[in-house]
Amino acid sequence: MDRVSITQDLSFSRLVYGMWRLGDDADTSPEHVRDKIAACLDQGITTMDQADIYGDYGAEELLGRALTPELRDRIEIVTKCDIIAPIGRHAGTPVKHYDTSRAHILASVEHSLRLMHTDRIDLLLIHRPDPLMDHEETGAALDEVVKSGKVRAVGVSNFRPWDWSLLQSAMATPLATNQIELSLTATAPFSNGDLAFHQQAALPVMAWSPLGGGTLMGDAGALGARLDAIAADRGVDRAAVAVAFLLRHPAKILPVMGTNSLDRIKRISDALDVNLARTEWFQLYEAALGAEVP
């Protein structure tokens, strides 16, 4: 599987396994989690996407219970911080909010390291833009965790270009990536400047919910019909075509694929076998927009 450079000494698999719903599975045993990781590794998928808030702040621990030293050395771990919601260990907070203070970032790193039984986070992302972010404080904290060796690279999630530029202006460490919602049901970044901003800087973009939260799999309209037609022609399913749509773009998009089904995990890499023609890409884009391009 192709790999994408995140920093000079860190690369990710082009497809990423997302662990958002890891705790929703009927079987959350270490053995079953290891089976999922093994199914990823068999395809060359080495990058695992986490966040402190996933699974009501429990998904990181589920991963940590499954990791052995040997397995840890075969994968890259992405995690995120700054969302505080009244669930799990933050059940007592009076309101969902964001915290990008130095104290919270440092505490979050320590907590994630402990839960995942590891001595390093490969990529730490600020999960959501914080209206109260002091970019000087946040930037210095991110520089600090990289300098400490506890975090190899840092980036953001759901940031617009101006949010990115503000934070980067206060940092010595280059931000490595932005993880944004991007799919055939979330096409705005293709035209609103989000992708262009990162593409111009040769910075990879991670795409969360590349299947539209599963809605693409049940679409009964023109988009679903177009996905089915291409899928039938290539001998794959809709998911592979929808992910191939993102891979076709030159902005080095890394789709984050989240599923608890071992069978579906084993077929994530089918998308790599789907080479969309330019006209096929635009047929999907037109169906997603509900109108032809201007």
Image: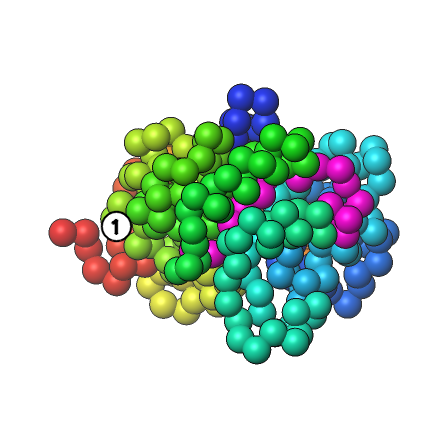
**Identity of the residue drawn at 60% across and 52% down:** 103
- Left or right of 176? Residue 152 is right
**Identity of the residue drawn at 71% across and 58% down:** 59
Magenta-span inclusion, residue 128: yes
Task: Report the front residue among 129 and 21.
Answer: 129
Q: Which quarter of the picture shows residue 27?
A: bottom right
Q: Is residue 101 above or below residue 73?
A: below
- Residue at disc 1, secondary structure: loop
Question: What percent of the width, then of the height, locates residue 45?
Answer: 64, 37
For disc 1, the marked residue is 192
Question: What percent of the width, then of the height, locates residue 176?
Answer: 48, 35
Q: Which residues are magenta?
A: 113-129
Magenta-span inclusion, residue 233: no
Q: Is residue 273 above or below residue 266?
A: above
Question: What percent of the width, then of the height, locates residue 221?
Answer: 36, 67
**Identity of the residue drawn at 52% across and 59% down:** 99
**Identity of the residue drawn at 50% across and 39% down:** 140
Task: Report the front residue among 130 and 38.
Answer: 130
Task: Determine if residue 42 is in view.
Answer: no
Task: Determine if residue 92 is in view.
Answer: yes
Q: What coloring was used for the rendering?
A: rainbow
Task: Report the front residue among 7 and 147.
Answer: 147
